[in-house]
Amino acid sequence: MRTGTALVVGAAVVLAGVALAGLHVNAYVYFAGYVILQYVVIATAWNILGGYAGYVNFGTPAFFALGAYTAVFLIRSLRAPLPVLIVAGGLVAALLGLGIGYLTLRLRGTFFSIATLALAVVLQTMIINWEYVGGSRGISVLRPSGPPFGSYVTFLFTVMVGLAVVAVTVARFIERSWIGRGLAALRDNEEAAECMGVPTLRLKLFATTVSGFLLGVAGAPFPYYVTFVEPNSAFAIDYAVNALAMPMIGGTTSWIGPVIGAVLLGTAQQLATVTISSELNLFIVGVVLVAFVVLAPEGILGLVRRWRGR
Amino acid sequence: MAATLLEVNGVVKRFGGFTALNRVTLQVKAGERFGLIGPIGSGKTTLINCVAGSLYADEGRILFEGRDVTTLPPHRRTRLGIARSFQIPKPFASMTVRENLGIPLEYAGHARASDEDAQVAELLREIGLEAKAHLRPAGLTQIEMRKLELARAMAARPKLLISDEAMAGLSSGEVDDILAILLRLNAQGITIIMIEHIMRAVMRFSQRIVVLDAGERIAEGTPDEIVRNPAVEKAYLGE
């Protein structure tokens, strides 16, 4: 796909989102759609570090929740408008990404993953003990009255469509630029990449920062979506598992992989929640992930490529 | 007398209590074919790692074209003109041979996107991998892998090429193949440091040889002088 075509597709997706928001179908569609789109952002953001650079981040909930709690803080202290929440949530999470990257990127492989897992635990403990943003009891958030159009849920849905398009555009741009090629080189062999002139530390810091930014962006509208934020839901393990499973299922080497994975798995989870039980979600993810790791380690993209190759 | 390209000055490298390099000093002149030999574990690769930047020297200084590079990260040294091949090939496995060469060309060889394809094609022709350009490294034979390793180092457009055992495990005909490539590169003006255990190759290739043993420099000279040096014989064969 050329860049021009991609921009047209992106614009079309946004317009389709707006149109869907104007349709006034069952409100649940927007609720579920929001979650799926949120996962498109999360999976895409995770993949910039996990897929392109090969650094598996188990700390997704930390970045997501930091975006959400930055929003809570700004709503409580300044009643800041949504665009400000999104940008601020992204920036704070980006800072966390940069800092964590600087501290942990000298660790490779599993050790990096363990460090990021610890990060989520530490941050959750801090939030639990911070009364101003609700502490362990949580905090209720009042939605601003009068959204620009439709109901507040359809408005948030449209916002998430936009954020998803932005996230995917950023990922696609990175993938096709010299940065993406450098990240792929260091994923394959870091020492060789460094010796071929690739500034590996700088590229990894760039990846953690951008990945963190987009994860924070995904979390920022969360308080208005749920209207009650508490640590267990903001730091839910679901985010860590899904962020990793969706790109793995879709395919990690291309921007479209996380999108496919998020849409498929996200939809399956929403359907299961309604028809069977909400407890079944992670079970589904687990089974599908194991199946893919065993049968199609390169995800759906890998399957398509193999099928085309024959 | 050609100018000194690389100057290694009293370099010390310790791993815990083990001294891998003990005050090693040597100079390599611009355009020279330089051999670095020594028994297994004598510190050859450690020294190369210190020169290329994969390891940092604990003491001593490394100068490249008169510039102190001792503390520069590897990618900066590559951009200045030091490129290396790895003893155990480390190709970028998810990329084709062509893409493998694109990385150093783009990051260190100052290639513009417009003429990158032409430069890749030229490198492939030079090294004889044209027919394999579209393959992933997993589809290459052992010698093709070594050639890719050398071609990738070449793509960084180095002034100094360090070939770390590029011939280990190859057949005699294949050794001649690699040797011919290295000689051709040297004729183009690239300074080459060859680390090798295949004596036939190093002796034929090198104009000057330095011998390491247990982290110490024990001899230096022309291939003829090295062959007759009793200290070298002792290091390799014992008393």
Image (cartoon, grey):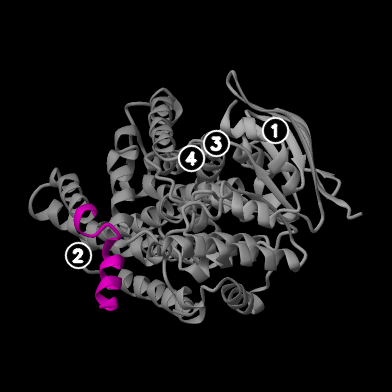
Per the rendering, the mark at residue A26 is 2
Inter-mark Cα distance, 4 to 1 = 73 Å
Query: Which span is picked out in magenta?
Result: A293-310
Query: How far across and how far down the image is residue B3, in percent?
Result: 88, 53
Query: Which mark is in front, 4 or 1?
Result: 1
Mark 1 near mark 2, Cβ–Cβ under 8 Å?
no
Inter-mark Cα distance, 3 to 4 = 57 Å
Query: Which mark is in front, 3 or 2?
Result: 3
The answer to whether dots 4 and 1 both sit on one chain is no
In-front residue for pair B81/B214:
B214
Mark 1 neighbour density, 10 Å: few (under 14) some (14–19) many (20 or more): few
Inter-mark Cα distance, 3 to 1 = 18 Å
Where is mark 4, residue-wise? Answer: A70
Label 2 marks a residue whose chain is: A
Point 32% across, 69% down: residue: A21
Label 4 marks a residue whose chain is: A
Query: How far across and how far down the image is residue B85, in percent?
Result: 59, 54
Mark 2 near mark 4, Cβ–Cβ under 8 Å?
no
Is A297 inside the magenta-drawn segment?
yes
Q: Secondary structure at mark 4?
A: helix
Query: How far across and how far down the image is residue B38, in percent?
Result: 62, 38
Per the rendering, the mark at residue B230 is 1
Q: Secondary structure at mark 2?
A: loop
Label 3 marks a residue whose chain is: B
The answer to whether dots 3 and 1 both sit on one chain is yes
* Residue A243 visible in image: yes
Where is mark 3, residue-wise? Answer: B40
Point 58% across, 28% down: residue: B238
Q: Outermost residue, right direction? A: B1
